[in-house]
Amino acid sequence: MIEIVPSILVKTKDEFEQMIRRLEPVTNRVHLDIIDGGFVPDKTILGYEELKTISTPLLFDVHLMVTQPGLYVPQWLDLNSDRIFIHAESEGDLGDLLAEIKAGGKKAGLVINPDTEVGFVLEYVPMIDYIQFMTVHPGSYGRTFLDEALNKIDSFHSDYPEIPIIADGGINPQTAGRAVAAGASILVSGSYIQNSSDPAKAISELKNGL
């Protein structure tokens, strides 16, 4: 079954809580983008500080678009984040970071930017529970879907069919089906859901697009 996960990218606690309350009735999971202002030219809330004062039943994918994920991973191990994703392009020992995530009882995911070759991360495949392909250049909402990312998804899926693949970015009813056809089983959608006046309808439209 294909999983649709709404993403949250916000700069204030108030906006964060507003999005959480809006999504609680329509999903059990969200994909929280954390951006440090260095890895890509934008900056968001830290997330773990805000969640200490916000009660929600939602589960969180934590997507660390940060230069040094080692500074952030420990903060998430005691929160309701059951899947933590780090970028292959970030600093630090990827193997150690993935091991730390898994030792903390969380699922570990590795994220690949559009310009990164898949071969760069193959040594870490035995350590990951998920691989996430960015189907846009990472950063703010509303970026253009990159069809060339589908070739990487297709190739990885052929070689490692047991590893769930996440496609993140530019997901709408037109691109959702193409990502799934290439091998993705989890779709992360930001602006299409967040810009809709009816998030439940938007999620349904994405599923219909499959």
Image (cartoon, helix red, strand yellow):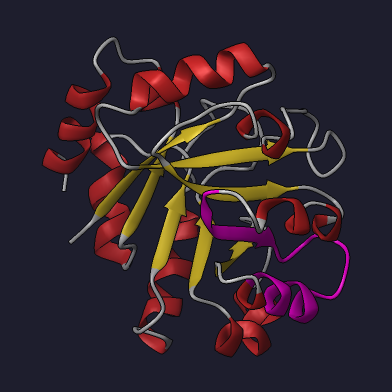
Direction from residue 165 to residue 202 in the image, left or right: left
Q: Residue at x 22, y 37 (%)?
A: 206
Q: Nearer the viewer, residue 200 or 133?
A: 200
Question: In this rendering, is residue 69 above or below 131?
Answer: above
Image x and y of residue 72, in percent? 78, 51
Q: Where, quadrant-wise, is the N terminus in this rendering?
A: bottom left
Direction from residue 7 to residue 95 in the image, left or right: right
The verdict on residue 24 being magenta is no
Q: Residue at x 57, y 85 (%)?
A: 125
Question: In this rendering, is residue 152 above or below 188?
Answer: below
The verdict on residue 98 being magenta is yes
Q: Residue at x 43, y 78 (%)?
A: 155
Direction from residue 38 to residue 145 in the image, left or right: left
Q: Nearer the viewer, residue 140 or 147?
A: 140
Quadrant location of residue 153?
A: bottom left
What is the magenta range? Answer: 80-101
Question: In this rendering, is residue 154 above or below 14?
Answer: below
Image x and y of residue 118, in percent? 60, 75
Q: Residue at x 72, y 28 (%)?
A: 45
Q: Nearer the viewer, residue 22 or 52?
A: 52
Image x and y of residue 87, in percent? 70, 60
